[in-house]
Amino acid sequence: MMIWHLLIQVVVLAISIGAPNAAQAARRYEIGLGVGELTVVALDSVSSGWAITNHFEGLQSSVFARAFLVADPELKTELIFVVVESANGDDPIKQAVLQKLQKKYPSRFTEENFVLTGTHTHGGPLPHDPDQPMIVKAVIDGVVEAVDAAVDDKAPGEITVSRGNLTTIARNRSEQAFDLNTETDKRALPLKIDPLMTQLAFWRDGKPVGLLNFFGVHPTTMVDEGFTYITSDSYGYAAYRIEDEMSRDTDGKRFVAAFAQTSAGDQTSNTHFDRCNDRTESSKHQWGCLRGVSELGPFESMKTVGEALAGQAMTLLSAKAASPADRNGYAQVKKPALPVDDGAAIGTEGLNYRQGLAELANVRVAAKYTAGKDEMTCAPAWGASHTAGSTEDLGTEFAAEGTDNSDSTAGYLIWALNGPSVVSQPVRTMLEMAGLGGFVNVPATNELIECQAPKEAILALQPRPVSMQVFKLGKMHFAIVPFELTVMSGHRIRRQMAETLGIDLDDVLVLGYGAGEAPNTSDDHSGGGYIVTPEEYESQQYEGGYTSWGKWSLPALAQALDQLASTLIGNGPPTKTTVASRPDDVLVKIANTPGNTLLGPTSWDGVPWFEQMGNIITSPATSYPAVAAEVSDKRRFVSAEFVSGHPMNRLRRGDSFAAVERRTTDGKWQVIQRSGSWGVKIQWKALPFWDCVGIRCLSAKVTWQIPDDIASGTYRLVQIGDYRPTYSLSEVIPFRGETLPFEVGAQR
């Protein structure tokens, strides 16, 4: 903590000397930044990122949406870019948000100039499930809140771009597939990862007010004891870390920092994933094999990765010159911050954007994109290896990665679904009854199976166009797609777009996890699986089995993006579609419903015999002295267990479930930390049924990791919540529980 704060002070000092490289002379934009909270402790819900998952039962960190508004007065263009701490951008959420924005800002934000992308944290529930209205409303309201704040914050400013490399927190989890790529391409990425970090910084009066960072790695460090917590993971930690420190130096106004994904499909921050090799334990995610970057477990791994992301971002924010390259040719600072229009050809400056739909099923792909001859894509389908899960998490026992699943459950299912009707029909019926109708909704024909080879097609999808976006900001060009791209797929798309647009490779980024329609098993068609190179497809690792249109999926996507991006040449005005009213959209109806009228998942909360809400079940110790100097692990934890209510009895966006308070010299109590911030976590558990006579009772365990730089003093833990009493089905009553005071010694 002290080292980090010192780093921030050095950065602030460097910035105070002057904005990097003449940002004062940059093209003037109008910029606005805003934040909205999405946090709901979705108790008993499951992750929208993991295939095999336990139910959520706690909160490790709050989750947010961060919005960046850019307007170009000269071109009369405007774009809002929103990063949500969720598995992906989520198209149903985007459509519902657009409906809300249309009422507030008619014709201002449309499909073309509203970008919604996710950090890909796996620590959150599906955001658009209408059976979970509180989650839906929290996400939509949080995104709208972020946009509103950015609109209100709109004022003249400048934007710079810088680039660097971060090589220490990522590893390719599908090297077997990566190694099949061409030698030329592999030389471009010698570490089998893409370490490029690109950063936009937003300035007013020579001072930074925010940053939007682009880097690709899976934020999936929270397994084992961290697996059941709502968490923004490493990307959220990095944003929180920067905002927490920088906001102290911006006259009380919140500094806004967001970390968006690029090509993270096969790039993981669990750099020791090969320590885990017992697939029978995969469904529990409780291996204890320390696959993350820290030997101290998932929480410290998440923090370590987050600190690395934040540290590199701060370096790019303040750097005045490039740094020397390492032995692999990577420099920590590749290009220091310059105005985004610096070096752009005359007539190509400013902000512009396009949105389009492309059909990728059964289309001809030109030889230009296949590095050979014209090829055809297939109708969409996912393969048996996609049901195996990735090498990073060992996936499931249902199938294995690779091209031969004949002796697996997936292989038997493929045979049964495509065998004689006397076999296939009962199997289809059972799958539908089990809620797995997606396996049988679209028949996997022999033609499809042959086209998709060597993929063993197990799940045919309904063809539908794919939505995608491109925009340019100065000389920087961005493509946004609703897929997870392997690092080599992203590299090839960037290279092709750079060639078509006549710009440098570093001036093109392709961003995965964007909101957009794509073939899927669900009715909402949000999120379209993976995109791998044709060579990687031959290996049929997890990512290849999850690539929809067969071997030539990537060339087809590159062709479609190339055609869309080429319309930016000449800087012609964007077309603007209207946002059609969707009065019957169930998500819109939920979003328009007052939060206090939404019913939570429980009708009432039980209270154990002879107890009341907020009572202490387990108390902390009376004192926590400093750890001896010779002890290597100096972490200290304080915990207490309270009688609690269900955390979804009321929407608590912007509120807390727990707090740490310190007694001041005048005897009053001062909040120093709240739930949702690093070091304070809360976990709900059901109490034994005999304590509650059949009514579900919950306890809440609050745990505080004492900061290294804590001052000696008297502290206490507090739990805050709401409960539904058994005597009233409509009333929600707030409660508060406090531990007895305890002493904490300063760490020497």
Image (cartoon, grey):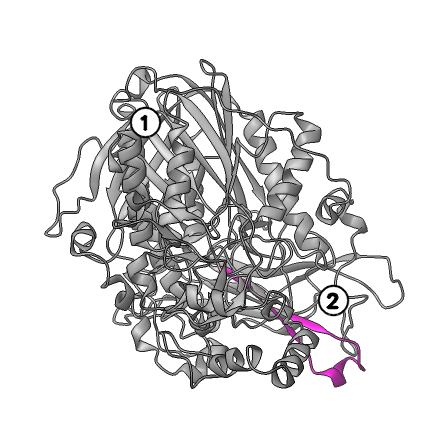
How far apart are the alpha carbons under marks 2 and 1? 58 Å
Q: Which residues are magenta?
A: 680-699
- 668 to the left or right of 479: right
- 20 to the left or right of 466: left
- 4 to the left or right of 234: left
At 57% from the left edge and 47% from the top edge, which residue is drawn? 666
Residue 451 position, x and y percent, is 42, 63
Residue 534 position, x and y percent, is 32, 58
Q: Which residue is mark 2?
A: 613
Q: Amino acid at mark 1?
A: Lys
Q: Which mark is residue 151?
A: none
Splitting the image into 4 quarters, where does residue 322 fall? Answer: top left
Q: Which residue is mark 1?
A: 475
Along the viewing direction, whichever of 365 and 96 lies nearer the viewer: 365
Kind of element beneath mark 2: loop
Along the viewing direction, whichever of 531 and 122 lies nearer the viewer: 531
Callout 2 crowding tier (Cα within 10 Å): few <14, some 14–19, many ≥20: many
Residue 701 vs 307, above or below: the answer is below
Q: Amino acid at mark 2?
A: Met
Mark nearer the N terminus (2 vs 1) = 1
At 76% from the left edge and 69% from the top edge, which residue is drawn? 612
Residue 228 position, x and y percent, is 54, 68
Residue 513 position, x and y percent, is 47, 50
Taking the view exactly as shown, the residue that stands out farthest to the top is: 74
